[in-house]
Amino acid sequence: ILSHDLLEGCYARSGLISDIQLYEDYPARYSGDVNRRRRWIRGDWQIAAWLRRPVPSVTGRRQKNPLSWLSQWKIFDNLRRSLVPPALVVLLLMGWGVLAPAWWWTAATLCVLLVPPLIATLIDVLQKPDEVRLAQHLVFVSRNAARHGLQVLFSIACLPHEALYSAGAVLRTLRRIVFTRRRLLEWTPSAAHDRGDPRTFAAMLRSMWVAPAIAIGVTAYIQSTHPAALAVAAPILLLWLAWPAFAWW
């Protein structure tokens, strides 16, 4: 079991200890964050068996699944979250090349990324503290909204790369669980996530080539088959084309 914390929490439940503070450094670079999330995805899929009725017991035999529906939902939701980037990329490509109209499918896909920050911004606007003046509150909300907007642009730009490593982590885990039964506990300590990361632009381009490659290939395909959809797809394809430079910066 690679990601043991969720499964331990589901078995042992939880308690409140209010006088303990835990600190963990966040990866300093995007590539380090990717390495950590790839391990999380592998760990989430390794405990997917706990969505079944019989599960392993301490004796090695099978027993009735003791986890509550809520605990099983937590496991399932992690699996769902890991499939969101590949699903969004597939939906965009289908909307530009197969489905119609292209603008509707593009807007529907982008809403998955845009609606949560919009809701968060609306909540910020409505939750004005009494001791803060309206002008100061609006300045604070506008800064948060701008940060949310940049995060959405970042998410759109890195979508092909996230789809590739998410799908790769899922397939690698399923292969190891079903066939090889080896390297199930492969992981890197948090302190070592940023070591060996690509530092130069050329190294970043070699590790994140998939986004520009998809952008070029999709552009050529749309230009030859559905040229009208290119006007809708062009802003996103430009973000994908520039993604290695964006990540390096």
Image (cartoon, rainbow, N blue to C red):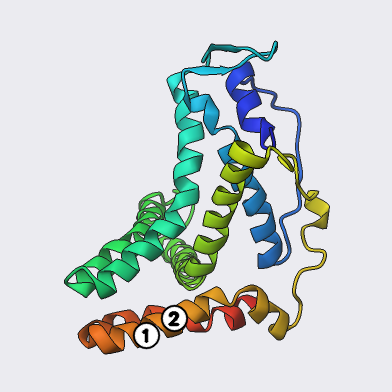
Which circle marks residue 215 in the picture? 2
Query: Which residue appears at 82% of the width and 53% of the height?
Result: 191
Quarter of the figure with residue 228 = bottom left
Q: Is residue 13 visible?
A: no
Assign the C terminus to one quadrant of the image: bottom right
Callout 2: helix, strand or loop?
Answer: helix
Tell me the amino acid under the disc marked 2: Ala
Query: Which residue appears at 37% of the width and 85% of the height?
Result: 219
Q: Nearer the viewer, residue 212 or 77?
A: 212
Residue 160, how many percent across, how many down?
Answer: 49, 68
Residue 104, placed above or below residue 48? below
Q: Residues at badges 1 and 2 in contact (C-beta under 8 Å)?
A: yes
Residue 133, how many percent across, how many down?
Answer: 45, 59
Q: Left or right: where does residue 90 sit relative to residue 22?
A: left
Residue 102, how many percent across, how many down?
Answer: 22, 73
Which circle marks residue 219 in the picture? 1
Which circle marks residue 54 in the picture? none
Residue 246, placed above or below residue 13? below
Query: Which residue appears at 76% of the width and 31% of the height?
Result: 20
Q: Nearer the viewer, residue 76 or 133?
A: 76
Label 2, residues with CA under 10 Å away: few <14, some 14-19, many ≥20: many
Query: Which residue appears at 67% of the width and 48% of the height?
Result: 39
Distance from disc 1 to disc 2, alpha carbons, whole Å, reads 6 Å
Assign the N terminus to one quadrant of the image: top right
